[in-house]
């Protein structure tokens, strides 16, 4: 059973960079057929897909966030990371890392982290 | 904005059947997946693909698709099914993932 756990600062100042790392246990990122994904949920709102990285380094991110987002992977540590630049209060959200198993080629998230609230405030 | 549209809220009497729908052009080419989320918890996958359930998900949850609309059906709703439900799939380009806005299901 794969498990995912985020780590990183819970408080980020406006205009600064949000950085989170997801550590995967119970399975290997390298060589896997999964898409390692970041998802967020702003307070009182729905789920929002941020982007993913494949083990070979190919990444995609939501067009509305692409200019500010980088998703990277470190297969030696079995971790993947999110960097979100120039944050504002609108980026305050619970951030989840998840495994996209892409069952039936339809992008299905079968494992999730517990989520971490990141607040953007001075 | 979301490329998948869900009704904001629906209610069902205990033991009755409810259908939650998800509409979007991408669903003509891709299946929808469904997630249950309770307050303060991470979502969990309850139905994926044609109509599959992960291990441990009760068989009262089922999925279907017709045209641009996917549906999650809960047959014999239980109090424990009171939650938010989200659909997701690929977008119309196939490159990204999208979520519906979510449906609050209240079991009366």
Image (cartoon, helix red, strand yellow):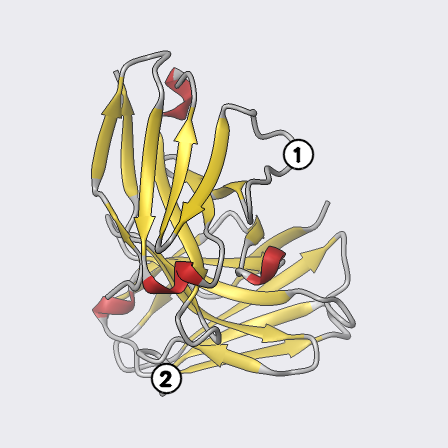
Q: Which residue is mark 2?
A: A68
The residue sitting at the bottom extreme is: A67
The residue lying at 33 percent from left, 26 percent from top is B18
Q: Is residue A119 left or right of residue B32?
A: left
Mark 1 belongs to which subunit?
Answer: B
Q: Is residue A60 above or below residue B64?
A: below
Mark 2 belongs to which subunit?
Answer: A
x, y (%) of residue A48?
A: 36, 61
* Discs 1 and 2 share one subunit: no
Q: Tag on residue B55?
A: 1
Residue B2 occupies quadrant: bottom left
Q: Is residue B63 left or right of residue B38?
A: right
Q: Is residue A77 above or below residue B22?
A: below
Question: Around disc 2, counting alpha carbons within 10 Å, would you say few (fewer than 14), some (14 to 19), or many (20 or more)?
Answer: some
Of the 4 image quadrants, the one containing the C terminus of chain A is bottom left
Residue B53 occupies quadrant: top right
Residue B5 occupies quadrant: bottom left
The residue sitting at the front extreme is: B67
């Amino acid at each position: 059973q794969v498990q995912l756990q985020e780590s990183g600062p819970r408080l980020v100042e406006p205009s600064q960079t949000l950085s989170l790392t997801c550590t995967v246990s119970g399975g290997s990122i390298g060589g896997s057929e999964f898409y390692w994904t970041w998802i967020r949920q702003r307070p009182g709102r729905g789920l929002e897909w941020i982007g993913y990285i494949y083990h070979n380094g190919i990444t995609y991110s939501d067009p509305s966030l692409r200019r500010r987002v980088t998703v990277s992977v470190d297969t030696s540590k079995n971790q993947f990371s999110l960097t979100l630049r120039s944050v504002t209060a609108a980026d305050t959200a619970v951030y989840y890392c998840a495994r996209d198993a892409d069952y039936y080629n339809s992008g299905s998230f079968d494992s999730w982290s517990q989520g971490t609230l990141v607040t953007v405030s001075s | 904005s979301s490329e998948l549209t869900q009704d904001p809220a629906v209610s069902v009497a205990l033991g009755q059947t409810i259908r939650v729908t998800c509409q979007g052009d991408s669903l003509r080419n891709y299946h929808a997946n469904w997630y249950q989320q309770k307050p303060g918890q991470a979502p969990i996958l309850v139905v994926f693909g044609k109509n599959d359930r992960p291990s441990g998900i009760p068989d009262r949850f089922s999925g279907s698709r017709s045209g641009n609309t996917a549906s999650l059906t809960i047959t014999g709703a239980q109090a424990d099914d009171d939650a938010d439900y989200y659909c997701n799939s690929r977008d119309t380009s196939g490159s990204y993932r999208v979520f519906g806005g979510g449906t609050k299901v209240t079991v009366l």
